[in-house]
Amino acid sequence: MCGITGWVSFDRDLTAESTALHAMTETMACRGPDDRGTWAEGPAALGHRRLAIIDLPGGRQPMSVRTPEGAVALVYSGETYNFTELRRELTDRGHEFTTDSDTEVVLHGYLEWGDAVAERLNGMYAFAVWDGRHGRLVMIRDRMGIKPFYYHPTPDGVLFGSEPKAILANPLARPRVALDGLRELFTLVKTPGHAVWDGMHEVEPGTVVTVDRTGLHTRVYWRLETRPHTDDRDTTIATVRALLDDIVRRQLVADVPRCTLLSGGLDSSAMTALAARQLAEHGEKVRSFAVDFVGQADNFVADELRGTPDTPFVHDVARLARTDHQDIVLDAQALADPAVREKVIRARDLPAGFGDMDTSLLLLFRAIRDQSTVALSGESADEVFGGYLQFFDEDVRRADTFPWLVHFGRHFGDDTDVLRPDLAKTLDLEGYIADGYRTAVSAIHRLDGESDFEYRMRQICHLHLTRFVRALLDRKDRMSMAVGLEVRVPFCDHRLVEYVYNTPWSLKSFDGREKSLLREATADLLPRSVYERVKSPYPSTQDPRYARALQDQVKDLLTRPSHPVFDLVDRERVRQAAERDTPVSTQVGRRGLERALDLAQWLDVYNPELTLS
């Protein structure tokens, strides 16, 4: 796992631009604390920061090969889980290797197959190849969008990076955000290709972007497609289990300490149990980590979203799987610390609006990084197997909008109500969401003979897998890489995603519950408590001291009426939230406070130019 960046300028020699390249590369230091490297030749310059995972001495980057027609150089972020098989195939084709790294396999794969190497990779990756033989830059992103990848066209080429901050470090890019960028900030719709910052774009998942003197060219090499599913229930369950066994085995490969993120829910428990069983075959124990909050297990208050605290279920799994387990217990002071919030904003480049669920994730990952470098996560199983409450909500099924927005509005409240009324009118978020929804559903193919209900459930599943999950994957990547921790997501293996997506909803929920296929596929590994547990979201603190700290910080902000945040948020509404007599301990009551503070911190850190009309 690493951070990559680069610059192609067809009208200049970039060997003379080492200062700018260095500045871009160093913004990725958190993603790659172990090593740094740059490469420049003619119109191309590449930068790399390395987090060493496989072949610690041999995987340095940028990695290049000199051919008679010109140099081919690569910067690569991520992991290719089938690199051993690809290495054998390439060796049979005459390629010679000098390292044991997956990076060199990807480079030689490009030399052999060109950008068609993307179709052969199983993994999470974002990489760029400068192909001096043809005078072009090739940028490739993994199928599910696990690894971030951004680019910014220039008059004579392109800038690119793992994160926007790398691009913004170049003098050719300015930190500007226009209305559509603000709309992305205040809606959880994750428009494909949108990067919020003016002039910047995401390399979309499953896509190759090529830049040469004729311009920019895009090729989609993978998309989530509708296919008939003919396997019966038993065969489907067995196939899911076989896929999971293979996926976890591949993703446990590393030359550094590994662990699992364990929440006590079905997803992380199944993944942890699989990892524990496989490592036990080699006499190893899996390390597992869970997040908790001071006093929450003893003073937990159930609500519509979270009926039980995580800790008892976490410990049931740890005992049964015999993991080396540790709870990371966080207090309200740490969660509300403005320095931690600033770290979150710098990691994400944006005020993303997840509040204490962002800060707790960052603090969890920071604590884990002291003991492990690679962590396996249960992220995305809800999207793959149909685990969210909104999948079973009749109002959501009937709604003509993104399913999670109905659910979030009901259970988390609306943090956009702190916006200035005039800005809210200009943004027209309802219209923006409606346009995005129509575009998204128009791409979903219906099977011949598929019932209205099954097609609606297919739409809901597709939207989660192509829109919602990308926001969560970006969050997980940014929070983990901010502390140099690589988080792998087994449930995002494209083979599993394709197979389960095409199972009909009647099979996904054959016992009337969420994630029926996953539950039965891993039933032999789970404690009964977890097997029977109802879905519970990522935890959030209930400590009123956290809400009180937010109120105090907002009151301090209100003493600075000239702060640019008040060009975005309504002072009176924020003041009312800050002066409540009883601090609200739930996410619903805190979201406006968190949003105002996040926006203020973002404006302080990035000082973006905002277009508000």
Image (tube, rainbow, N blue to C red):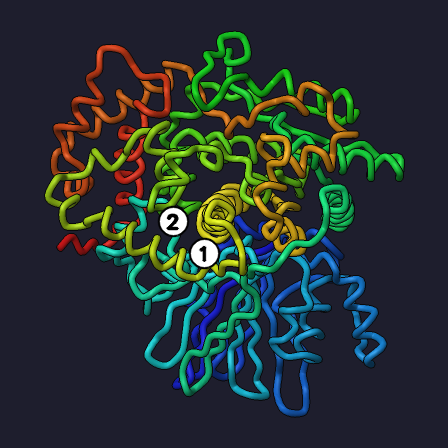
Residue closest to the eye, 402 or 209: 402
In the rendered view, would you say 509 is above or below 531? below
The x and y percentages for residue 298 are: 53, 8
Examine the image and state in which quarter residue 323 appears.
top right
Residue at label 1?
163
In the rendered view, would you say 91 is above or below 42? above
Observer able to see residue 23? no
Q: Residue at x 38, y 32 (%)?
A: 355
What residue type is disc 2 on?
Asp
Residue closest to the eye, 142 or 336: 142
Q: Residue at x 61, y 68 (%)?
A: 62
Q: Which mark is residue 349?
A: 2
| Callouts 2 and 1 close, C-beta under 8 Å | yes
How crowded is the residue under tag 2: few (<14 C-alpha within 10 Å), some, or many (20+)? Answer: some
Q: Secondary structure at mark 1?
A: loop
How crowded is the residue under tag 1: few (<14 C-alpha within 10 Å), some, or many (20+)? Answer: many
In the rendered view, would you say 413 is above or below 353? above
Q: Residue at x 51, y 18 (%)?
A: 307
The x and y percentages for residue 27 are: 46, 55
Residue closest to the eye, 271 or 478: 271
- Label 2 vs 1, first from the N-terminus: 1
Q: Which mark is residue 374?
A: none
The x and y percentages for residue 132 are: 57, 85
What residue type is disc 1 on?
Glu
Q: Secondary structure at mark 2?
A: loop
